[in-house]
Image: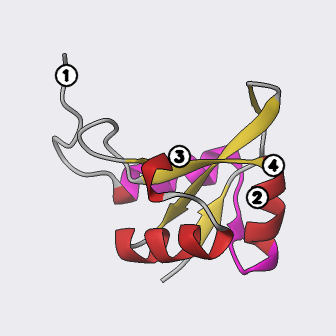
Amino acid sequence: MAVYVDAAIWNWAGHRWCHLMADDTDELHRFAAQLGIKHSSYQGPPKTSAPHYDITGFERDRAVRLGAIECSREEIVAIFRRVRVPNGKIKR
């Protein structure tokens, strides 16, 4: 199992943000807990179709030190497609 992060390029609320994803949702939650990220920050079905956390650039640096694999934009999109839950997002 692996955990992945893309570049922290998304500006919001005075921080740069990125995505934390994993091959397995349980692994994703365990890794996020290691980083001290609250489970309430989790984004997955039915809100989004791919399980992930949005994390700050500071948290990203810590994630990489703990073993997360750095990914390009193209790579994280491929991971998103691989781990997404079919029909996971509810359209409103």
What secondary structure predominates along the stretch shown in magenta?
A: helix
Q: Which of marks 4 and 1 is nearer the N terminus?
A: 4
Q: Considering the numbered disc 1 on the image, is that residue within a helix, a strand or a loop? A: loop
Contact? badges 2 and 4 (CB < 8 Å)? yes
Q: Which of marks 1 and 3 is in front?
A: 1
* Picture layout, residue 61 above or below residue 91: below
Magenta segment: 65-82
Residue where numbered disc 2 is placed: 60
Q: Which of marks 3 and 4 is in front?
A: 4
Residue where numbered disc 4 is placed: 57
* Picture layout, residue 46 above or below residue 51: above
Displayed quadrant of residue 13: top right
Residue where numbered disc 1 is placed: 91
Name the side, left or right, on which 39 lies relative to 45: right
Measured Cα–Cα span from mark 4 to mark 1? 30 Å
Q: Considering the numbered disc 3 on the image, is that residue within a helix, a strand or a loop? A: helix
* Picture layout, residue 25 above or below residue 90: below
Question: For the residue carrying disc 4, how many other residues have a C-alpha within 10 Å: few (<14), some (14-19), or many (20+)?
Answer: many
Measured Cα–Cα span from mark 2 to mark 4? 5 Å
